[in-house]
Amino acid sequence: MEFENRLKGIKLIVFDLDGTLLNDDGMIGIRSKQLIKQLEERDVHFSFATGRLHSAITAFAEELQLKSPLISLDGCLIKSFPDNNLLFESNVKRKHVLKAISFAENFLINIALCHGDAIYYTEYNSIIPRITDKFGARYEEVHSYDECMDNTLEILLAGENYDLIKFVQSRMDFPYMFGLTSASFKSQRHKDIYYLEIRRKGSSKRTGVFRLLKYFRLNIKEAAVCGDWYNDLSLFQTRALKVAVANAVSEIKGCSDIILEKSNNEDGTADFLEMVLKAKKRK
């Protein structure tokens, strides 16, 4: 009874995209789309919390006809949809961008600067579009990083030498630098390519969801989050109702309130949406 009441009380559902709401072909399941529409008629809000750029997620928001702020770049940027008003952004300081560029040039590591609308790279980093995993992103070559240093939400470094990537990460972290957060990891699609993502400290999918709750004037227990991957962990460290698709990594499943039997390729999120709809239909 308590669980059903929790489902009845859900007023905001936040999806990760890749591996969760989207199948491996980058499509939203038909059942999920139908159920989202039905739940919207019952005053449930929907949003995304994704590592993608904002420009790479608006097509999905349009497909679902959402009218909610969207969380992109893992919480660094929040813009309303469909009017595209800026609600929050967390820009990396210019001095930190300059330092990262200096390290990249000294160690021959590829580097790009991520903004909300595009990923910028120079001629000397022209391999960036081919070796990075930023789904749906628009890449734009610039003559110099001086043109786009301001408004950088994320610094992206990519290379084959993991030790160098880790060394740069250590030098961009405390005690050498203050106010940054970073993550280094191996590419899922490109063999022997490693990434380092550097952002301003204090933004995550978790903080993004709390900003959405404030926007809608809701309590965290009125929210549900759905995810599958390591960058969703901050979402799953809240008191929201936590939902993992069947293909989620064990760390996400271990934090979940609901583990779905179906994967993202089986429209697994639809099963959770149906649970919520059925609970709301019961008197």
Image: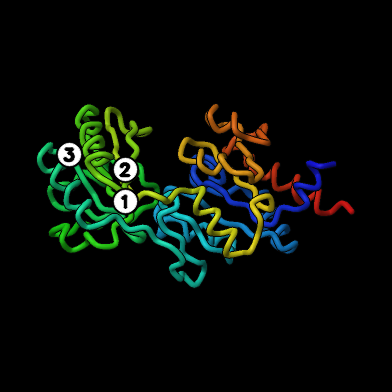
Indicate the position of residue 78 as horizontal and vertical percent values. 46, 60
Q: Earlier in the sequence, mark 2 or mark 1?
A: 1
Q: CA distance from mark 3 to mark 2?
A: 13 Å
Q: Which secondary structure, mark 2?
A: strand
Q: Which residue is mark 3?
A: 109
* Front residue of this view, candidates 276 and 102: 102
The residue carrying mark 2 is 197
Residue 25 in the figure: left or right of residue 131: right
Amino acid at pointer 2: Glu
Q: CA distance from mark 1 to mark 3?
A: 16 Å
Residue that protrudes farthest toward the right in the picture: 283
Residue 39's x, y, as percent? Answer: 72, 57
Q: How many marks are shown on the rendered structure?
A: 3
SS label for mark 1: strand
Identify the image quadrant of residue 242: top right
Decide: is 37 above or below 267: below
Q: Residue 261 at what x, y percent from top left?
A: 67, 32
Do the CB atoms of the residues marked 2 and 1 lie less than 8 Å apart?
yes
Tag 1 residue: 154
**Among the two numbered marks 3 and 2 on one chain, the one whose residue lies closer to the N terminus:** 3
Q: In the image, what residue occupies the spot 28% across and 46% down? A: 178
Identify the amino acid type marked 1. Answer: Glu
Quarter occupied by the N terminus: top right
Mark 3 secondary-structure assignment: loop
- Observer-nearest residue: 271 or 209? 209
Q: Residue at x 47, y 35 (%)?
A: 230
Closest to the camera, between mark 1 and mark 3, is 1
Residue 159 placement (x, y as % from top left): 22, 35
Q: Please name which of the two marks, 3 or 2, marks the residue nearer to the observer.
A: 2
Q: Is residue 139 visible?
A: no
